[in-house]
Image (spheres, rainbow, N blue to C red):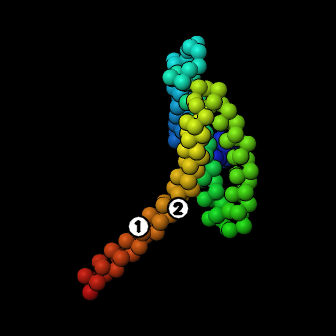
């Protein structure tokens, strides 16, 4: 199964280099090509004001949100392995996030956001990690409920046949 975070050689070893792998690679290239073109399309040389925020600051918010979502996925996956691995991963992610969030705050300030808005947006992107953390948990619950539903339906079908 293809998973987020696997390198291309790992995916090719596992699934072979078929059409699905090629489409995933092409989709990723096209996604970031379009994102880059949108950012460059909005490129400007206007001075930074409170009414004008530079596009790189918005791009930083998108990238930081994706990064934090993946951090949440990694933390959730590590807790699914076992508790000590989860704790170690959580500590590692927190330690690596502190300087990154400080840097992101500086990027947002330089991009034209006020201190308060930059802090609020930085907090919002950090909270996206919670969505990443909850995603596998909700998926696990949904799978458990669907398997219970399948077993219940099978039992009901057996009872009707008797």
Closer to the camera in the image, 94 or 160: 94
- Using the image, determine if residue 134 lies above or below residue 53: below
Residue 56 is marked as none
Label 2: few (<14), some or many (≥20) within 10 Å?
A: some
Counting from the top left corner in percent of width and height, residue 153 is at 33, 74
Closer to the camera in the image, 31 or 56: 56
Q: Mark 2 highlights which residue? A: 137
Position of 18 compared to 86: left or right?
A: left
Identify the residue at horizontal 29%, vertical 77% (top origin): 157
| Closer mark to the observer between disc 1 and disc 2 | 2
Position of 159 compared to 98: left or right?
A: left
Cα separation between marks 1 and 2? 14 Å
- Residue 29 seen: no
Q: Which residue sits furthest top?
A: 45
Q: Mark 1 highlights which residue? A: 146
Q: Which residue sits furthest bottom?
A: 162
Q: Earlier in the sequence, mark 1 or mark 2?
A: 2
Closer to the camera in the image, 117 or 126: 117
Counting from the top left corner in percent of width and height, residue 115 is at 61, 34
């Amino acid at each position: 199964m293809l998973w987020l975070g696997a390198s291309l050689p790992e995916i090719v070893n596992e699934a072979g280099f078929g059409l699905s792998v090629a489409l995933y690679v092409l989709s990723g290239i096209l996604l970031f090509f379009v994102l880059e073109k949108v950012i460059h399309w909005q490129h400007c040389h206007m001075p930074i004001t409170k009414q004008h925020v530079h596009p790189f600051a918005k791009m930083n918010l998108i990238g930081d949100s994706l990064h934090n979502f993946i951090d949440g996925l990694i933390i959730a996956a590590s807790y699914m392995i076992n508790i000590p691995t989860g704790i170690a991963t959580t500590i590692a992610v927190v330690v690596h996030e502190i300087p990154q969030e400080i840097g992101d705050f500086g990027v947002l300030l330089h991009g034209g956001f006020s201190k308060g808005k930059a802090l609020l947006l930085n907090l919002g992107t950090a909270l996206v990690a919670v969505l990443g953390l909850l995603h596998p948990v909700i998926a696990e619950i949904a799978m458990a409920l669907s398997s219970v539903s399948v077993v219940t339906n099978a039992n009901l079908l057996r009872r009707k046949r008797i």
